[in-house]
Structure formats: structure tokens, C-alpha cells
Amino acid sequence: MLRGESAARDWADLTEEGHRGVRACRIVDFDALDTRRGRALAIAAAREALRQSGRAEAVDGHAGGIFVGSTLGESAAFEQAGAGASIDLSDHGVPSFCDGLATELALTGPREAVATACAAGNYAIGAAALALQQGRAAWALAGGVEPFSRLSMVGFGRSRAMANGDCRPFDARRTGMLVGEGSAMLVLERLDDALARGATPLAEVRGLGLSSDAHHPTAPRPDGRGMRRAMRAALAEAGVTPADVDWVNVHGTGTRASDAAEGRALREVFDGVPMPLLSGSKGALGHALGAASAIEAVLCVSGLLDQVVPPTSGHEQVDPEIGHPCTRERTPPVRRPMRVVMNNAFAFGGINSTLVLTRWEPA
Amino acid sequence: MRSVVNDVPNHETLDSRGTSLLRASLWCPLPHQPSEQESLETVLDDLAPIFETVPAVDGEREGALLVVSDDAGNATAVKFWRDALSTGLAVASPAAFPWCLANAACATIARRFGVTGPNLTWLVSFTDPRTAFDAPAAWVAGSKCLGSGDGKRVDAWLVALHFGAPTARAMLWHWTGSGADSERDNHLVLATELRDRMAADWSLADTAGPHRALYALTI
């Protein structure tokens, strides 16, 4: 990420299977049963998060809730069922990720399986934050997971959403997205609880703004109205103004329509104030669909910790229609003091989400 | 008659302080169709009265739409891949692809009725209906659906969907509250009561059989 490079490559197995588009970002050297790959990815991510946080060793280590976002669940299970295999699909949907985490980690708190397509990670983090505010969970694992999906490769490819070559977020030459995969999990807890057990918070979850375009099954509103509404709602909940925002991690799929709408929405939200730094990750990592915004939330947290905004792989030429550049590919990361970051995530069905995170600053 | 609407007089409230109200419910069996899309689209008109109690402004209704389902997207995903294998991956029809995603039903309802607020879909198990309705009830009771706390009226529509035969059905509830509720400390009480009401309705529909009216939502 910090070198601005892309993990995308062409995959011989996809060529052999007859896919038209064969370029994607996939995790190599990760062994798991095809129909449990998502669960295994989620568990691996959760273990890293728990180790970093030290939460599992706390007195109430097993009382954590689980909040997971995804699109399809175990895509391979649905594909095998479509090919005629007898598979219990009720045990391979998004809730199966929560069940797997609960069993593997012996967690007894509430579970929510959030199925809000490519914005699901943001929603899951917001759901966890709400549960903490309401006292429904002592602490929470929250994030997203998406195993590599051949079904999505075909669906997006045949919908003409896939890139011809590389994914170029916000770039004038962008042609579409690339599918990725992965999982990211965060440990969320109430600030007082974290401080009481001696933990050092990495960042604060300050606000989640949500809206619906109510416009089209797959395309965003061209005027970006719904995206703008989500961003403004997030800022309002966070108690910050547009002028306070230092960095926006854009949704930036690299598709013509979505990036153009997001660009318009950004121009209106930041009208009259300097445009924050913009960056996007999908040129480097592909679009991990339901996991994407959780992965990008982790990038945001890392950026706040290190006070650095990564380059945007694939972004070279500013699109006049968008009017604002992202950080350029293969340029040094931008280092500057930052306190507030917005994480945008939008999805099929016209759903829009913006998560506001702030740097942890002890009182 | 395929569906039943129960409207509730305004004096019946979920909240003893009188500003949160579960106004109406609707229950309609979902006809068996090859896909979730076709199944849901046959009942959209039946859902209209519950949404249209809130006037649209420029075609939009500011409210939250919260959906729970145990199988949304499953049938379409399997059929989409079966068809893709049959026709060839490089030439598969993309038409059904959006309906492989569980949130397509929520998006369709939002589009049909112009609901532009938060739009959420949870995948749940209805084996324990109380657990199934925990999350949307908590969102309604919490600040996410209650606006800025300025006392402005807010609406939330809660939908439960099960597409699989033989008990395929859609249930819809309309909740109205006040933004001022977000300041309250009794949101857990409200969430619990709302969850239990929806769970009881869902369970009653399990045993009552199709076409029988649900009782009015008096709490």
C-alpha cells in the first residue's frame, strides 16, 4: 500500500474455467476449505485483532459480541450448490461467519450478520458501536469478510463493472473495478472500559452516517445526493465540521458512475472549505466487497496512528468531472498531522455509508 | 384477500411516555416463485398502505428501512450460478446478479416507496424469533433511527422476509417516534418491547396459517 503498488494479477485458473475477466486480487498461501474460506479468513483476522488489543485476556474476555458484514457469505458453497452439490446453505451464509467466530473464540455476546453488500464493513462497525452505547455488549469484534467469489467475478463482469486492465480510482482513464478478497476485524470497546484495563486506544469511532438512494438496483444517483447525505449525517453524529476533516478514504471503485457521483458529493460536502486529502485502496487491494470498508477502516486507523496517507494505486490523471485528485500512485505517502478521517462505502441497492474515525488523543 | 393491515389508534404506544408508537403491521404470504425478486414484486402493492401513511416529499420519505431475513438471496445465487454454468461464464446473463445479494429486497422496497434513510439488512435465524428481531429493534430504539434529537418526527419500517416454502411470508411494521427519544435512557426497554412484539407476531403467523388476520398491535 505505502509503495502505491497493486496486488492485481491475471489468474490462470480463472482463464481455464472460462471467465471473461481474469484479473483480481487474491490472497495466496492461505489454506482453507473452499466452502469455509470466509470463516477461516475472519478467524485469522479476529485473532490478530484480539492479540493486538489484549482484549481476550481481559476479565470479560469471552463476553464479546460479534458484528460481521459480508455480501454473499461463503460464495463457494453457493457455487457448488449451483453446480448440483447438496449443501446446507443455511450454514454457509453471512451468519455462519459469526457462528464460526463465536465457536472458535468462545465468545458469548450478541451476534449480528449484516448483509449490506459492498458497504457492510462500515455498517458492522456502526452496529457494534451502537451495541456498546446501549450496553448490549461488553466489547465487540466488528468487521467484514469476503472470500474470493467466482460468482461475483461473473456478475460484475457481465454487468460491465469490471476494469479493462487495472483499477484506477478517481482517474480520468478508469474503466471499472477488480474483485478482491479478505477480512478485517477490529476490537471495539467503550473508552472507559479500555482505559480501565490499561489499553491504549488506536482510534475513536465517532459517527456513522447512512442513507439510501432509492434510485436504481445497481447505479448510484448521478448527483451524489445520497452519498452526500450519508457524509453529512456522519459528520453531524461525530460532532465535526467539514473543515475538521483531514482525510477521506474514498469508496473509489474505479467505475465511471460511482466515482463520478462520489466526486460530486465530495465537492458539495466540502464546498467552501479546503478539500481533505483523498485516497483509495481498491487499485491496490481490489474490491473486497463486504469486507472492503472494514479493511479500509483498518487502513484509516493505521493512517491516523502513523499520520500518513497512502498513495492511490492506479490514480495518475485527475478526472475533470471529479475535479479533485487522490494521492498519486507510486509517490511517497503523504505525511502530515491528521485528526479526523472519513471512510466512505457505497453499494449495490443504492446504500451509502460514511464512518468517521478520529485519532486517539488522551485528555 | 392476500394481506392484512392492522392500523392502531394513536393512543396505543410502546413507550409509556407516549411518543414512540408502533402504528401498524401487515402480513402477507409470499407466493412461490423461481426467485426472490419475482416473489417480492408480487406483494409490493400490498405493502403500499403502510408506507403511504407517511406523505412523500418529492417522491422521498425520510425514514429507516430495516430488514431481517433468513434466506434472502440464497435461491437467486444458486440459480444464477447454475444458469451461468449452463450458458458459459463468459456469456452469462447478469440480470439476476443484484438479487444474489441479500440486501436487494431492502433496496427494492426502498426504491418502490422512496425511503431514503438508513437501509439495513440483517441475515438471521428465525429459530428463535426474539433473537432474530434484536438488531432492528435496537436500531429503532437507538439514536441511529431517531434523528438529531430535536423532536422531529421520525419513521422506521421494519420488514421480515422468509422466501422458502412452505411458510414464505413478508411481515411489515411501521414505527413512528420523536427525535427527542434519543435523549432517553429507556431505549433498552423500548427495544425489548418492540423486539418481543415483532417476535410474537412472527410466531403467531407460524401457527395461524395464511390469510388470517393478525391481532391489532395494542401494547
Image: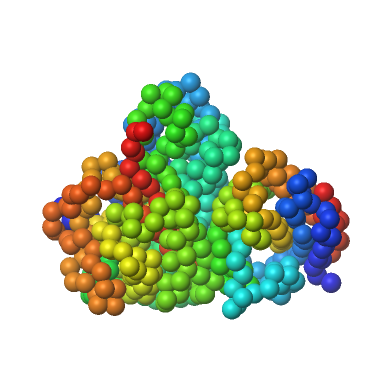
Left or right of A89 on screen, residue A9: left
Q: Residue furthest top?
A: A59
In the rendered structure, the answer to whether residue B200 lies left or right of residue A317 reads right
Q: Nearer the viewer, residue A343 or B26?
A: A343
Whether residue B31 is visible here, answered yes or no, is no
**Residue in the image at 29% along x and 73% along y:** A322
Q: Residue at x 14, y 58 (%)?
A: A330
Colour mapping used in the image: rainbow
Q: Is residue B30 above or below residue A51?
A: below
Whether residue A144 sits left or right of residue A165 in the image: it is right
Which residue is rendered at x = 31% and y = 47% of the image?
Answer: A339
Q: Position of residue B27 (x, y in %)?
A: 77, 62
Residue B126 appearing in the image: yes
Instruction: Answer above or below: position of B139 versus B119.
Output: above
Q: How many marks?
A: 0
- Name the foreground residue: B185 vs A291: B185
Indicate the quadrant containing the C terminus of chain A: top left, top right, bottom left or bottom right: top left
User: Is residue A34 placed above or below A166 in the rendered structure?
Assistant: above
Relative to the observer, which residue lies in front, A22 or A49? A49
Q: Position of residue A39 (x, y in %)?
A: 44, 43
| Residue A11 locus on image (x, y percent) | 26, 60
Query: Compared to B20, does B100 lie above or below?
Result: below
Left or right placement of residue A213 versus residue A187 in this view: right
Query: To which quarter of the image does residue A199 belong?
Result: top left
**What residue lies at 70% left-to-right and 58% top-to-bottom?**
B176
Could you say where residue B117 lies in the image, as x and y percent from the top left? 56, 63
